[in-house]
Amino acid sequence: MDLSLYRDILPEDFSAVYRRSLPQMSRCHLHDQFEIVLLPNGRGRLILGEEPHPLGPGSLVLLGSMDLHRFSFVSEEEAGRYVLFFPPDYADALSTAQHNLLSCFFFRPFPNAQLLSLDEKQTAALAGRMDRLIALSAPSAEWGRPLAIRFELGQLLLEINRLYLAAHGIGKTVAAGETYSRVYRILRYIHHNLTGDLSLGALSARFYISPHYLCTLFRQITGTTPAQYILNCRIRKAKDLLIAGCSVDEACSGAGFGNLTHFSRTFRQITGSPPKKYAAAHREQADGERR
């Protein structure tokens, strides 16, 4: 079953642009690259999963590879925004054990962690960084251009993390960088192996970490338990499949649920709707958008 309606394949690993056009992706989607969006003066909405969030001047949006999202703007006049895509490994070589530049994408034990509201001075400073990245992204044979891009990206992420930690009242030494890297590897494994054995024992054995310590790290970084995170991922995967036209049986097995009755009951508890009704509602919505 084609899931291209849901997963957006970007043409380049790295991209820095200023856009005024309305978004072309009408459905919520994912991509492997991390995304930073800054609205200096615009207004619109960010839909995270199924929850809408208003955006205004100074809105900063931080989206990881597991954040299901789409943007909506009323007009091109209000759609002006900086958009930056980059692969997470771009930041690895620039991070240290004490200061991981991806902290703002991983340390999220609170609601709406993908959003920050900046003042005019903060917005102008980040916009300046974005402008420099856009200039560096232009085709050029200048020696060291790829390095210059990474260094400028590192400065941008450094400033964003400082704003993020300050906005959420987080101390300077939240966790060592290795902690983030370790949990990130576990998150990626979960994300790509939803139909496999993701029990606490299996994860502990695979990543050479005790079950108790795994739960402690997981809650510290994600704000939830491994079991709850995996369940949320599987429900989201089931939504993918149902929206793409899969049957309830196919969604059940494709999302890693071994029992159809358990899947249907759990799906209804979390989404408030049985799988069949959920799929039908989204088909009606898609038909309405095409009219």
Image (spheres, helix red, strand yellow):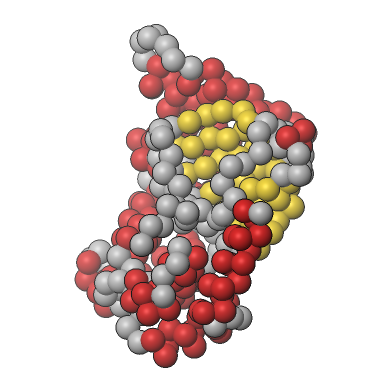
The answer to whether residue 90 shows anywhere in this view is yes
Q: Position of residue 189 (x, y in %)?
A: 31, 61
**Front position in the image: 9 or 32:** 9
Q: What quarter of the picture does the C terminus occupy?
A: bottom right
Residue 68: give x, y in percent of width and height: 53, 57
Task: Give how far across and how far down residue 100 sits, in percent.
Answer: 44, 44
Where's residue 23, x and y in %?
Answer: 62, 41
Farthest residue, direction bottom:
261
**Image quarter in which the N terminus is found:** bottom left
Task: Judge left or right: residue 162 versus residue 103.
Answer: right
Q: Residue 43 or 119: which is nearer the viewer?
A: 43
Residue that sits furthest to the front in the current view = 291
Residue beneath the point at 61% across and 81% down: 272
The image shows residue 20, relative to residue 101, as above or below, that is above
26 up-or-down from 80: above or below? below
Occupied quadrant, residue 208: bottom left
Q: State the residue at coordinates (59%, 60%).
A: 286
Can residue 160 be seen here? The reply is no
Residue furthest top as drawn? 142
Q: How many marks?
A: 0
What's the residue at 71%, 50% (across, down)? 45
Q: Is residue 189 left or right of residue 29?
A: left
Image position of 263 (left or right of 24): left
Q: Residue at x 63, y 31 (%)?
A: 19
Q: Is residue 189 left or right of residue 230?
A: left
